[in-house]
Amino acid sequence: GKQADNGTNNAGEQFSRAGFILAAIGSSVGLGNMWKFPYITGKYGGAAFFMVFIICLIIIGLPIMLAEMAIGRGGRGSAAASFTRLSGNKTWGGLGFISVLASFLIFSYYAVVAGWTLHYAMLSFTGNLFTSTDFGARFDTFIGSYWPIFWQGIVLLLTVLVLTAGISAGIERFNKILIPGLVILLVALVVRSLTLEGAAEGVGFFLNPDFGKLTPEAVLAALGHAFFSLSLGMGIMITYGAYVNKRQSLSGAAMAVGIGDLLYAFLAGMIIFPTTFAFQLEPAQGPGLAFVVLPVAFSAMPLGAWFGGLFFILLAIAALTSAVSLLEVSVSFLLERVKWGRTKTVWITGIVCFIVGLPSALSVGGTVKGLSFGGRSIFDWVDFVTSNIMLPLGGLIVTIFAGYFWKNASEEAGLTAGWFKVWLFMLRYIAPILVVLVFLYSTGLIRF
Ligand code: PHE
């Protein structure tokens, strides 16, 4: 709209109360909830791990999320400018820029994977997914072809179209339409999974607490995933926070996002384990689970083509609502520096992100040979560097800034004096240590 086109990202455009919460939930609910969370929960002790995960969400996830939202609302700018504005020191803005870069790079390959889900939704609905039973070969052929680029382009196009419409008519409206759809699909698929013969065994595996598996490694996995799952450390909640009304309770919003993310992850487990166990499949993680393992189940169950299609649409929705949040971080950053207006800025950011993502798209399935170094494809490298290095770094900068350097933190966070003390204690002493531990572990610098 006109308002958004005056070259700044705080052109008076705001989320409604519910719109902000839905957009933040849309960002945090993503592919990770479906293909990482159930797997690590099963692997590290079911309900025992789940409890640790909840504790991690509460003691580091929520405090950092609240800090990010408050920095954005207080600074009224991008994930870089907000820091500068609140501290009067450009160095902080430079540090904030790390998150802007992280979200841009994450989106460059996230769009590729989101594209795969769209392709598989089509394949499943048309029944073409089930013409052969070798789903591994089919997936390898697909990602080794040039088709993923087409679907990556579609994802970028959709994201660009949402973002050109601005905050309330774009991001907010998109999430308001898609999140209810996501809930309906989720419930339908949970009901389908739980009514499969042999489902109970899967539920048992998911939820039986096994404290023996609760190793230090498990605890760090829980911490790292809490961080990734809430979309922290990449400037998203700062960027969205800049569009939030001064009267809205940020702690309430952070709590709602935490609960929404947790609930979705739990229900995702209620789909994955009953389904894999009912068909005697090995519950895996990552693309292998969604594109290779689960299609076996869909091919064998009544109306499986439909349930498969709905499952991939569910994944696509979860990915797209994260996609818009990822790209908006860069858009809001650029709007403060260029005079192109929102529409042009969004298109240029989207096109550049598409191009930057091409090496990821073409390396992951070996479409173009030679795009691997040191045993990792470019896709894996971008994922590794962003998730394991830039993300913890971004989170650390937030905790240090809000914990030690930001004088008016209390005003913006809107907590009672007692809760403010607790929050500050977490930001100062607990969160930084835990974030550094996750960093050391996930980069392989410490081992157990
Ligand atoms: N939080 C999303 C998930 O759980 C992923 C994501 C990470 C989205 C980083 C945006 C940024 O899958």
Image (spheres, grey):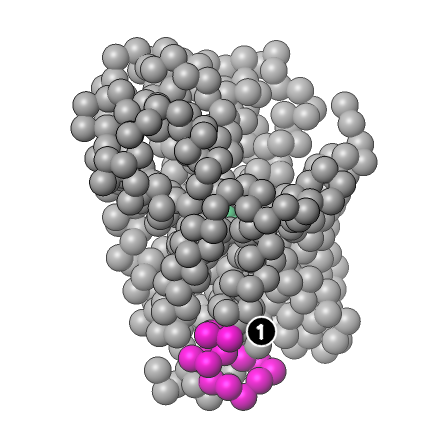
State which quarter of the image contains the N terminus: bottom left
Q: Secondary structure at mark 1?
A: helix
State which quarter of the image contains the C terminus: top right
Residue pointed to by mark 1: 333
Residue 35 appears in the figure: no
Residue 334 placed where, x, y %? 57, 77
Point out the residue furthest to the left here.
Answer: 303
Residue 82 appears in the figure: yes
In magenta, the rendered stretch is 335-348
| Residue occupying the point 63% across, 46% down | 369
Magenta span main SS: helix
342 is within the stretch colored magenta: yes
Residue 109 placed where, x, y %? 54, 52
- Quarter of the image where one finds residue 304: top left
Residue 59 placed where, x, y %? 60, 40
Question: 11 or 112, which lies in front?
Answer: 112
| Residue occupying the point 43% across, 50% down | 147
Question: 368 or 55, which lies in front?
Answer: 368
**Amino acid bearing label 1:** Phe
> Alpha-carbon neighbours of circle 1 within 10 Å: few (<14), some, or many (≥20)?
many
